[in-house]
Image (tube, grey):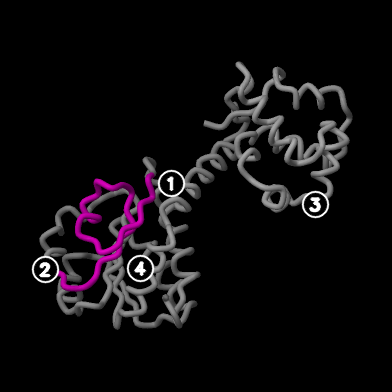
Amino acid sequence: MSVELTQETDIVKKVKDKELTKTEKIIYDYIKTNPKKVLLIGIRNLSEEINVSMGSIMKFCKNTLELGGYSDLKLQLAEDLAKANSTKAVVYNSVFESLENEYENIYKNIKMDTDPQKFKRFNHLINSAENILIYDTAFGGLSRIAISLFYRKGVKHVSFIDNMNLGIKNILDMKKNDVLLVISPGDDKFKAHNQLLDVCESKIISIVNDRLNSISQKSELTFYTNVEKYENGFIATLTYLRNLISYLDLKNWF
């Protein structure tokens, strides 16, 4: 749940009766509605996040908040957040703001899950495969997107199957170092095909919604979206595909 600073904090009190410029308001609004995030990031990250120069942020800290600089802003935030009633839950004014918050949480989950070792393993498996077969347990749309992304990257030895029953021969023909990429954005229809996965000799990479998903138990490498809503599972899975394939290193996976 997102929170924002209340009137009980010194930062809000200092700004309360001041007339802010457009740039100052951008800086203040972000600090007020993202106090915990600002506490953890550097001035350069904040500058890139809100598209405001570091000089303008420093000027805001010194002139508007009457602090020594960005480090003092962090100290002030820490003091404010330690006070009782220093924050309140954000009430969203529109469906777009609510969706923005949900997507931000999705991206955080993905960032936490995609560590360097998993990314390196993905590169190794894809580079070692003579053939890549994709199966989307939902409706096939993600498999077509994945193939398009692979093609743009220069990976041509990739195909997909729409129906697992009709694609049995394709799976049984796969070799040990080939890759079966299983995409399950939330609706696990793959349970009926667990025996088929047992006889599949290829490496299995999966993108699934949670760690209890039956697919992950049989996968060489699994990425977890950690979402509850099916539509968020689609967004999260698509984000995984775009990042993993777009930054695929075809020349050197070490």
Q: Which labelled disc corresponds to residue 199?
A: 2
Percent x, y of residue 192: 14, 55
Say which quarter of the image contains residue 245.
Answer: bottom left
Q: Secondary structure at mark 4?
A: helix
x then y, percent, for residue 163: 23, 65
The mark nearer the N terminus, 3 or 2, is 3
- Circle nearer the viewer, 3 or 1: 3
Question: In the image, what residue type sits under mark 4?
Answer: Arg
Q: Which residue is mark 3?
A: 53
Distance from the alpha carbon under mark 4 to that under mark 1: 25 Å
The answer to whether residue 190 is above or below residue 126 is: above
> Amino acid type of disc 3?
Ser
Where is the C terminus found, in terms of image quarters? Answer: bottom left
- Secondary structure at badge 1 equals helix
The residue under label 1 is 232
Instruction: Give whichever of discs 4 and 3 has the lower sequence position.
Output: 3
Q: Determine whether, in the image, residue 76 is placed left or right of residue 165.
A: right
Compared across the picture, whether 216 is left or right of 95 comes to left
Task: State which tag comes first along the sequence, 4 or 1.
Answer: 4
**Gap between marks 3 and 2, in whole Å?**
57 Å
Identify residue for label 4: 121
